[in-house]
Image (cartoon, helix red, strand yellow):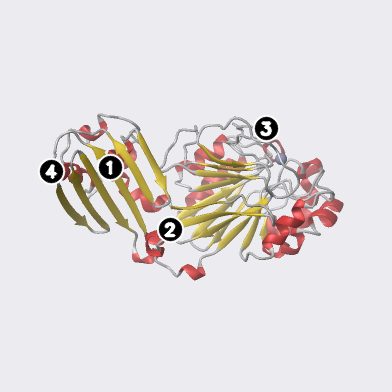
Amino acid sequence: MNAFVRLCAMMILATMVAGAPAATASASTSTPGHRATATHVGSTAKITVQAIAPEAMQAMPAADPVLVGAGDIAGCASAGDEATAALLDTITGTVFTLGDNAYPSGTAQQFADCYGSSWGRHKARTRPATGNHDYVTAGAAAYFDYFGVAAGEPGKGYYSYNLGAWHIVVLNSNCWAVGGCETNSAQYRWLVADLAANPVTCTLAYWHHPRFSSGPHGNSTAVLPFWQALYAAGADVVLNGHDHDYERFAPQTPDALADPVLGMRQFVVGSGGYSHYATGQPVANSEVRNSNTYGVLKLTLHPASYDWLFVPEAGKTFSDSGSAVCHSVVMPYRASLPLVSMAPLYSFKGTKIEATTPLAKYKTADALNRVVRPTVPPNRLARPWPHNDSNALAAW
Ligand SMILES: [Zn+2]
């Protein structure tokens, strides 16, 4: 993908099935940070909007940090964690874990002998999260002892750090062990304050139990408050484990409504090496699933976008890759997007939105005028996204 596009641009491509014009017509316009063209060919109108991010976001790709890891990792009887640790040997960057680090009980001996002999050699660059198996040992004491200050304040298991232009939040979804995950809990209050104190371009969060999963554990409502706080803050990516498989979701709201513009993209990366779980009937917005490949997820964190790549263990071929723009890049142009949102079919594909919409009442120049507006009325930003609202454009 073109680096300029990947780093600093967002493209909206709306193909409208219009009823009227039979001839070819085109128009174009631009505003600061915006370039747009519209062309009618026969009964189809194609609109392209390219929104260019500020110069400050155009950093050097070579310096962009990498975040790589998985969850559900080490067992002394499994060779899987040796296979995924071998992948880490070849990938530089910060290592994340998504909990259930040392099976079966997270004891000091299992951390030393099972985790220590594989992922342990990358401990100095690891920022872990804790899982339910780590808590089989009371208070996850061995987990906190093993990782030390890298795991945040002992006993809490939630903390945050910055990586390049990104803010990274680690949460503890073993809610019972830390005073809960609800909106009145200490952890939730910390999360909201942490997000408010770090209004950066891109935000990623990870913890153990997934809000959404097609694996045997299924969806979890216990971590819904995490999703609500992160979504409200415009966060971009969520990583989880617990189900021993790999799954990628389309961007969605905390309530599982597809939201290609401001939804969070969740990955289940329970492929760290301990064992495999079969996935069942796909839950809403599930895009990719794999149940037979250990591997790690490598995220390259650009200043205003990210690339993901699932790297399989040696001898396996399953992979998954893609890229997306951070919400803070999209946000200023949110008022441009209702036209696209009205489409019955639309999707984010990397840095591009593709849509087909039956709007017939607007001619090229009119539609273009509505897509590209020099200023965004403040009340537009405050309102919820008008999904499939056929009156939204007219009212707007
Ligand atoms: Zn678990």
**Mark whose residue sits in front, 3 or 4:** 4
Circles 2 and 1 in contact, beta carbons < 8 Å? no
The residue labelled by disc 3 is 216
Name the residue beneath numbered marker 4.
23
User: Which residue is tagged 1?
Assistant: 15
Q: Position of residue 163 (x, y in %)?
A: 55, 61
Element class at badge 4: loop
- Measure the C-alpha gap from mark 2 to mark 1: 26 Å
Determine the quadrant in which ligand 1 lies: top right
- Badge 3, how many Cα within 10 Å: few under 14, some, many 20+? some
Give the amino acid at mark 1.
Thr
Q: Judge by depth and name the residue closer to the eye, 108 or 257.
A: 257
Nearer to the camera, 190 or 256: 256
Task: Please name the residue shown 68% across and 44% down the image.
Answer: 292
Q: In which quarter of the image is residue 178?
A: top right
Q: Is residue 391 left or right of residue 60?
A: left
Q: Could you say where residue 216 lies in the image, as x and y percent from the top left?
A: 67, 32
Picture coordinates of residue 293 (x, y %)? Answer: 67, 47
- Residue 261 shows up from this direction: no
Q: Earlier in the sequence, mark 3 or mark 1?
A: 1
At mark 2, the secondary structure is loop
Q: Name the residue under label 2.
A: 304
Q: Is 107 on the left or on the right of 313, as rendered? A: right
Nearer the observer, 396 or 377: 396
| Alpha carbon separation for disc pair 3 and 1 | 39 Å
Q: Earlier in the sequence, mark 2 or mark 4?
A: 4
Q: How crowded is mark 1: few (under 14 residues within 10 Å), some or many (20 or more)?
A: many
